[in-house]
Image: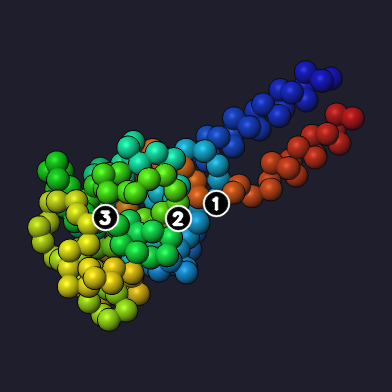
Amino acid sequence: MKKMVVLALGLLCVSNVAMAASWTENGDAGDLPGSAQVPQGSGALDSISGTIGANTDADMYCISVPTSGGFVATTCGGATIDTQLWIFAEDGTGITFDDDDPAGCGLQSTLTGTFLPGPGQYLIAISSYSNDALNAGGNEIWADSPFATERTPDGPGAGDPVIASWNGAGSSSGAYTIFLSGAEFCGQPTPTIERSWGQIKSIYK
């Protein structure tokens, strides 16, 4: 009987790990630190999928980066719209941005851990081209160009690089997948496993 319990628990854990590898936008993810969506799960987070529902839309998610040296986020192969990727600190301070992939995959975007200050939790955001992050003064935190270069804040709002809004001037809308390497879930898993384990114990008393 104990073997059956162990097997059942093992299958449950394997299933949870398989589902925990990716996250699909739940409803409409927020676009600012106070409303950013927190993917629920544990361990490695391999991708985030969602939809830019209108040209004015931007989606923001919390991710955990255990070591900045191995981090990569890209929409190459995961979107047909012209994307922009952004990373902010938890308080909304801009860290790094890319419009067009530096390696030349087209109008999609790629970020690395080059400018991350170290391990920790960060906010990753996606928008379509020209829907840009603004600070409290309404100034763009990043300049519009160069396009195919990952860079730290360099726009007229770089002196106060905390995001307060978006300019809403996006060029396209549609589905996207952000492929991730070196990222983990930011939120804790829901208590489904605990309930299921309780059910298993009641069955095999």
Residue at the image point whose x is 29% and y is 68% from the top: 161
What's the distance in space between the residues labelled 3 and 1, CA to CA?
22 Å
Give the number of the disc on residue 62: 2
Residue at the spot of label 3: 96
Three-letter code, disc 2: Cys
In the displayed structure image, the side of residue 106 where residue 64 appears, left or right: right
Circle 3/circle 1 CB separation < 8 Å = no
Which residue lies at the image location 24% right of the left edge and 47% below the top edge? 110
State which tag comes first along the sequence, 2 or 3: 2
Q: Secondary structure at mark 3?
A: strand
Mark 1 element type: loop
Residue 167 position in % (x across, y down):
25, 75
Quarter of the figure with the N terminus: top right
Q: Position of residue 43 (x, y in %)?
A: 52, 38
Which label's residue is closer to the chain start, 3 or 1?
3
The amino acid type, in three-letter code, at marker 3 is Thr
Residue 116 located left or right of residue 205: left
Q: Nearer the viewer, mark 3 or mark 1?
A: 3
Q: Amino acid at mark 1?
A: Gly
User: Whole-percent x and y of residue 105?
Assistant: 15, 43
45 relative position to 197: left or right: left
